[in-house]
Amino acid sequence: LHSNDGCDFIDFLAGIIGGIHADATPREIGFTLRTVQLHLKSEAPMRHGGSLGADELVPLLAPVLMRAVGMFPALRPWHLCSQLATVDDQMLSDNPDLSAALAGLQDVCERIEERAIERWRGTACDACFWRTLCRVPTPKALVQVAMDPVCNLIENTLIQSLRAELHHIEGNDVWSKCDHVSGYLSMLDQVASTLLP
């Protein structure tokens, strides 16, 4: 998918998704998405080298969907999911392609959202760590590291272990205890200040 042909293929599929108009019915959305999935199913094995099962095909929809959003900023994948979710169970059982389209889109949206949140949390944690390390009065850890004549903060083992500890605490305690962003960032600042007195 990283070759020129692969990028063209993703652009082609993204164009199909981008063709979903604002007043499309859930059935039209579903069959458009299923068309993209079938293109992936038929083309990806040739481009990827070998046959791919459903577990390998669903993640391939992620770069296509992300590219479609980049090409067509008005496209809202979660809105498409909510529209598809209005299809009744009988229609889904009568149209397995529609059901597959809904399941595939939901799975990809969840994966993209999960990855985005993970990256945001990692970045927020790093920003908090460095902001706390650079505060006045200077934390003891920074004073200790600064005594080393060849001080490199990023590669210093003490700094690396403190940063890793903050990430560990964030993952085990902070994230699970907060239900909104400001509370999360505030608690993260408190933990960082405790870790870096």
Image: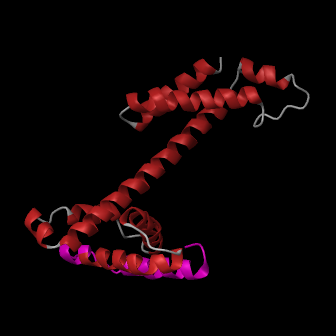
The quadrant in which residue 39 appears is: bottom left
Judge whether 21 appears above or below 160 on screen: below
Q: What stretch of residues is rendered in magenta?
A: 1-30
Query: Where is residue 156 shown, x and y percent of the image?
Result: 78, 31
In the image, taking residue 157 as reference, residue 53 lies left or right, namely left
Residue, x 58% and y 25% (percent of image)?
192
| Closer to us: 50 or 80 | 50
Quarter of the figure with the C terminus? top right
Quadrant of the image containing the N terminus: bottom right
Q: Residue at x 59, y 72 (%)?
A: 2
The image quadrant that residue 123 belongs to is: top right
Residue ranking furthest to the left: 90
Tell me what residue is drawn at x 22 percent, y 78 percent.
28
- 95 sits left or right of 47 in the view: left
Q: Main secondary structure of the magenta part?
A: helix
Residue 87 lies, with reference to residue 130, above or below; the image says: below
Closer to the camera in the image, 93 or 141:
93
Q: Residue at x 51, y 41 (%)?
A: 121
102 within the magenta span: no
Look at the image and say whether residue 21 sits in the magenta stretch. yes
Residue 194 visible: yes
